[in-house]
Structure formats: structure tokens, C-alpha cells
């Protein structure tokens, strides 16, 4: 039985910071096991957050390439800090990067954060750019977490992650199915920032509002929700389809968020069956009012795990993707992404 130690790096669409998780993985009798060795989050400096969240898509080609390299070095430096703090040295680093462009129907995607820079700074072999091959094989390149849901968290009927977007995975027959449900924190945080808050803590702002039925119906009628899976969401769709509806409604912040929470809960209920177990992770798991609405509308048995899993499950699974790369096992499932075949995503930079 071989043990692999891997560090996973995860930066979500909300671009509030970097999650780092070091875990040890073993495979016995064909089943993967994991143990989290250590994990922590790093907040982004304000300038970096602004560049990732607002400026990167408008950069010139030269500025973009320079930032890709600089952000990779930043990631590598945080890993060095992490390894020094916890006294660990992994066999491999697996980095998600930060999604800048994601339009798979046009074969367009880019995960910023140069893996070569991470490897150069840390002197540890690094795998990055996990989505590109899948997209070139006709897939969505997303979501990537379901392979970990399948092999590490298969005891739950549904695995739901709530971050910038909500995404879900579950088994249907012999296949793993997964897709993005709706934007969540990417929308919520955009509105809370208008009053100087980074988030709607516990859903307190939304809880004071009222549901605006006309806006709710317009949101629920957006074409994405009627599409069959495989499917995935990106910033571009939100900015073209969601923000204009919310802005045009002219509602108070409280009513805007209350209506949007109801929309998110409604979309979850559409794709789940009552009475099933639902593992909820990601920052949205701490939003008490949002979870209440999701539980009420879906009638699922919501499971909120220990904080390490809530906060670092995606970083843990990225660490696992690095291990799958080393083990020469597929990390992208065609049943999830719609690609022509399962594939081993990522590019390796080896010191």
C-alpha cells in the first residue's frame, strides 16, 4: 500500500483568498482513503483581490501574461509559508488556479496562476491547468470535484458545494453526474460590497427582506436552468444574464438578496429528491438563512460536516487530483463534463 502526500490549492470564483490543504492518500483493496494532515486559508491582499475580481479580464495580452506568472509566484510563496509553518513536504502540488475565462462551447478557458512558477518557487513538482484537455475533448472542463465526491465521499446521496457558484454531484446508475446549479456568493457578495461588506454573514441581510415574485420568476426562467447536463457556469453568463435582471428590478438590498436566496434554494430543489442525504460544503454552508431555505424547499437531510471539510473539501480534492495524476488515473469524468472520454487533466511541471 503506497502513501501519497499532496498539497491542493483552491481559489474560488469569489476571489476572497486561497485555501491550502495537505493530505495523505492511500489505496487499499481498490478504495482510496484520505487523512488531512493540515490546512489553512490565506486572505488575498486588497490589490490582488481587485486584479483577480475586476481587472484581469480587461488586461492587455502582455499584462495578462505577466500577471499569470506573478500570481503563480504568489501561490508558490504561500505554499512555502505553509510548508514552513506545518513542517510538511509533499510529493506533489495540485493547483486549481483562478478561473478568468470559461466558455467551453467556444473552446475558451483560462485558469490563471502559472504552475511552472509554483514549481520554480517551491521546488516541488506541480500539476495545474486541469480543465484544458477536457474542453478540447468536447467537455465542459468542469466541475472537477466530482471524482473526489465519488471516491472519497460516496456515502452521501448528494454532494453540494456552495461557493461563488453552487455545484452538485450524485450517482445515477453507474455514472457520476455533476453540474453547476446556480451562481451564489458571486452574486451575493457583489451586492453586499455596495455597503462595504464582503459577505452577508449568516444571511442576516436577506432575512430582513421580502421575496419579489416577478424578479424570482424572471430568474427561474433563465435558459441555463432548463438545459440538460453536462453544463457549467462562468462569470460571463452571470454578468450577461443575472446582474441586468437584479439591477433593473430596483429593489432594496434586503429584498434583492431575499429574492436571490429563494432563487438559489428553488434551483437546488429542482435537481434533488426529498429525503436524500445532502452533504453541504464551501463558504455558503455557514450562511444559516440560505441553508434554512435550501432545506425547506428541497426537503433533503442536510449534513453540515466538520469545519475542516466545510472549508477545505475542494482543496482536499485538488490534492487528490494531484495524486490521481501520479497514479495515472482519470480525474475528469466524461459522464460529468460531456467530453468524448474520461481523461487525466493537468500539466506537470517537474523540478
Image (cartoon, helix red, strand yellow):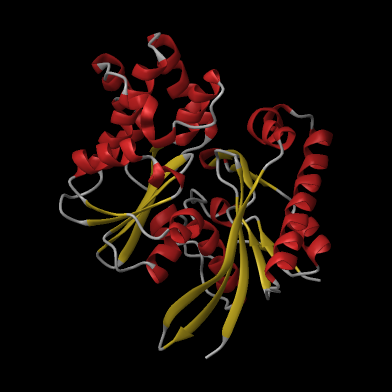
Number of labels in the image equals 0
Q: Residue at x 40, y 63 (%)?
A: 149
Q: Position of residue 185 (x, y in %)?
A: 46, 35
User: In this view of the protein, which residue sits in the foreground, 126 or 275?
Assistant: 275
- From the viewer's side, name the closer residue of 26 and 69: 26
Above or below 74: residue 14: above
Query: Looking at the image, can residue 16 be seen?
Result: yes
Q: Nearer the viewer, residue 314 or 172?
A: 314
- Report which quarter residue 348 is drawn in: bottom right
Picture coordinates of residue 206, whole percent (x, y): 35, 25
26 lies above or below 325:
below
Residue occupying the point 57% across, 76% down: 328
**Residue 65: where, in percent of width, then height?**
80, 41
Q: Is residue 340 visible?
A: no
Image quadrant for the C terminus?
Answer: bottom right
- Name the one closer to the observer, 133 or 271: 271
The residue sitting at 79% across, 64% down in the picture is 122
Residue 347 screen position, x and y as percent: 68, 62
Image-based side of 289 in relation to 59, left or right:
left
351 horizontally vs 315: left or right: right
| Residue found at the far bottom of this picture | 1
Q: Is residue 152 left or right of residue 296?
A: right
Residue drawn at 33 percent across, 68 percent down: 154
The quarter holding residue 24 reads bottom right
Amino acid at each position: 500500500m503506497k502513501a501519497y502526500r499532496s498539497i491542493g490549492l483552491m481559489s474560488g470564483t469569489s476571489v476572497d483568498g486561497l485555501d491550502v490543504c495537505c493530505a495523505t492518500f492511500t489505496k487499499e483493496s481498490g478504495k482510496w482513503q484520505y487523512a488531512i494532515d493540515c490546512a489553512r486559508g490565506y486572505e488575498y491582499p486588497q490589490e490582488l483581490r481587485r486584479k483577480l475580481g475586476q481587472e484581469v479580464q480587461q488586461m492587455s495580452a502582455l499584462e495578462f501574461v505577466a500577471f499569470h506568472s506573478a500570481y503563480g509566484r504568489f501561490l508558490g510563496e504561500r505554499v512555502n509559508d505553509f510548508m514552513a509553518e506545518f513542517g510538511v513536504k509533499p510529493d506533489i502540488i495540485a493547483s486549481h488556479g483562478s478561473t478568468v475565462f470559461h466558455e467551453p462551447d467556444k473552446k475558451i478557458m483560462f485558469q490563471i496562476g502559472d504552475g511552472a512558477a509554483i514549481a520554480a518557487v517551491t521546488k516541488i513538482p506541480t500539476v495545474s491547468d486541469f480543465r484544458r484537455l477536457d474542453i478540447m475533448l468536447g467537455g465542459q472542463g468542469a466541475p472537477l470535484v466530482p471524482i473526489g465526491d465519488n471516491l472519497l465521499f460516496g456515502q452521501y446521496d448528494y454532494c453540494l458545494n456552495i461557493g461563488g457558484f453552487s455545484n452538485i454531484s450524485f450517482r445515477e446508475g453507474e455514472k457520476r453526474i455533476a453540474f453547476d446549479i446556480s451562481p451564489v456568493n458571486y452574486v451575493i457578495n457583489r451586492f453586499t460590497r455596495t455597503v462595504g461588506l464582503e459577505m452577508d454573514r449568516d444571511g442576516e441581510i436577506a432575512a430582513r427582506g421580502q421575496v419579489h415574485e416577478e424578479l424570482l420568476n424572471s430568474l427561474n426562467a433563465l435558459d441555463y436552468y432548463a438545459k440538460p447536463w453536462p453544463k457549467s457556469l462562468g462569470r460571463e453568463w452571470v454578468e450577461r444574464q443575472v446582474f441586468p435582471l437584479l439591477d433593473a428590478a430596483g429593489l432594496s438590498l434586503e429584498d434583492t438578496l431575499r429574492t436571490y436566496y429563494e432563487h438559489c434554494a428553488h434551483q437546488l430543489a429542482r435537481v434533488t429528491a426529498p429525503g436524500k442525504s445532502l452533504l453541504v460544503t464551501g463558504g455558503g454552508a455557514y450562511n444559516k438563512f440560505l441553508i434554512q431555505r435550501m432545506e425547506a424547499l428541497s426537503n433533503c437531510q442536510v449534513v453540515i460536516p466538520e469545519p475542516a471539510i466545510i472549508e477545505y473539501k475542494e482543496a482536499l480534492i485538488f490534492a487528490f487530483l494531484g495524486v490521481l495524476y501520479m497514479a495515472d488515473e482519470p480525474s475528469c469524468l466524461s459522464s460529468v463534463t460531456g467530453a468524448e472520454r474520461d481523461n487525466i487533466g493537468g500539466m506537470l511541471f517537474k523540478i
